[in-house]
Amino acid sequence: MKKLLLLEANGNAGEDLLDAASELGVQVYVATHEDICRNYRPAVRDKIAEVIFTDFTSQEIALKELSEFGRRTGIDGVITGWEFFSPLVTRLAAELGLPGHDVHRAEACRNKRLMAHAFGEHEVPAPMTVTASDYTSVAGQLAASGLRFPLVVKPAENAGSIGVSVVSSADELAAAFQLAQNWPYEFPHGVPLENTVLIQEYVGGKEFSVETVIFRGTVRHLAITEKFTTDNASRAELGHTVPADLAADSRAMLLDTVERALAALGLRNGIAHTEIKLLPEGGAKIIEVGARPPGDHIMKLVQHALGISEPRAYIQVALGEEPDLEPRSSAAAAIRFITPPRAGVFRGVGDIPRSPAIVESAVYLAPGTEAKDPNDNVGRVGHLIVKAESQAEVNWIAANLMDTIAVEVT
Ligand SMILES: Nc1ncnc2c1ncn2[C@@H]1O[C@H](COP(=O)(O)OP(=O)(O)O)[C@@H](O)[C@H]1O
Ligand SMILES: [Mg+2]
């Protein structure tokens, strides 16, 4: 039986990865922290052969301990279920001589400052960016750069739209900068986060993500996902649809741009989730690349729509095996997030409507608990996953269902 080391099973891709491993007959070892493991649901815990505790507050200690464990146990492949560990998993694969990405560019796949630099060096279309860790230099840097409002201000190393603002005038800049520096540590492992802030050209147009498998340097795209976000000062993601409805030329151009980004970041063996905007004037710009499973249950959407198991493919590549990427269906699937109108005490979401199109629904909060501000992805209180024959149909059904759901907060 082959042995796989999964860095954190707690993310929303964790269970999908564990299930795919079990279908492949692969034994899974999970690296996590004791306090986090204590809260694993029994259904998750039962799918794990053994858990290994390490201290993620130091990535160096984690690398040392996990490579020792990997050698001792005879681990055959390493994957991550948690975005913040994508550099660590690349370094671990290199340390153990297992399939992975270019170790010299491991950090650039996560840290947006290094990513912007790699894109600049390789002429990958991306937003014009300045970076600063101290606000006093910002006005001078902006004047020298020629950047104009609106601007996007965001932290170099966070995720889930946390600390991301769209700023339309100089008056709002200081507060946005401060907000971007509000999270010095990742939650829940306490990984230290660089305090650099990116200030970027605001890229207009429509946003997509591209789900990709890379095996021995060869890129295979699974799907382009249509993304729905809020369009006020914050940028929370409201939902996704797989596959996006796109003309062939736009599709080809998006995929070509993604391939240039993946090459710039040295992705060779694994999966990638790339966020990209299709510009109204033509062309595209990369927002970010993640060398990790997509969040937001996008892997489930790919499975429902196309019949391709991305977690299975990720595991196969990590073990050095040819991934199974044959589509077995040509439907469409969508997820929509249920968000509160404002922060407050959560009272419920009323009745979730019944529909044969719904394949999954979830409400995360118990009545009487605190609902957070809907400004980032942390503010979500639940979701619906819907399946239909086409994108137009699934988007229409999802919109109608969401219209009938009222989140009550007091
Ligand atoms: N330069 C930009 N121009 C326009 N929108 C942006 C830009 N940067 C980020 N966004 C929006 O904010 C969202 C979150 O930013 P992102 O860079 O993906 O950070 P995170 O790691 O938090 O997901 C993006 O999905 C996009 O909608
Ligand atoms: Mg993002």
Image (cartoon, rainbow, N blue to C red):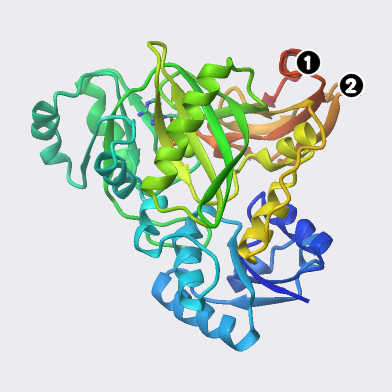
- Label 2 SS: loop
Foreground: 307 or 333? Answer: 307
Quarter of the picture containing the N terminus is: bottom right
Q: Is residue 330 left or right of residue 30?
A: right
Which quarter of the frame holds ligand 1?
top left
Residue 145, image x, y percentages: 13, 29
Give the residue pinned by disc 2: 355
Q: Which residue type does callout 1 highlight?
A: Ile
Give the residue pinned by disc 1: 397
- Label 1 SS: helix
Q: Which residue type does callout 2 highlight?
A: Ser
Foreground: 51 or 241? Answer: 241
Please indicate, yes or no, whether residue 235 appears anywhere in the rendered image.
no
At x 51%, y 31%, the residue is 255
Quarter of the picture containing the C terminus is: top right
Residue 168, image x, y percentages: 29, 18
Foreground: 6 or 347? Answer: 6
Mark 2–mark 1 CB contact (< 8 Å): yes
Q: Residues within 10 Å of mark 1 (few under 14, many from 20)?
A: some
At x 77%, y 67%, the residue is 45
Q: Residues within 10 Å of mark 2 (few under 14, many from 20)?
A: few
Question: Alpha-carbon distance for marks 2 and 1?
Answer: 9 Å
Residue 66, image x, y percentages: 53, 78
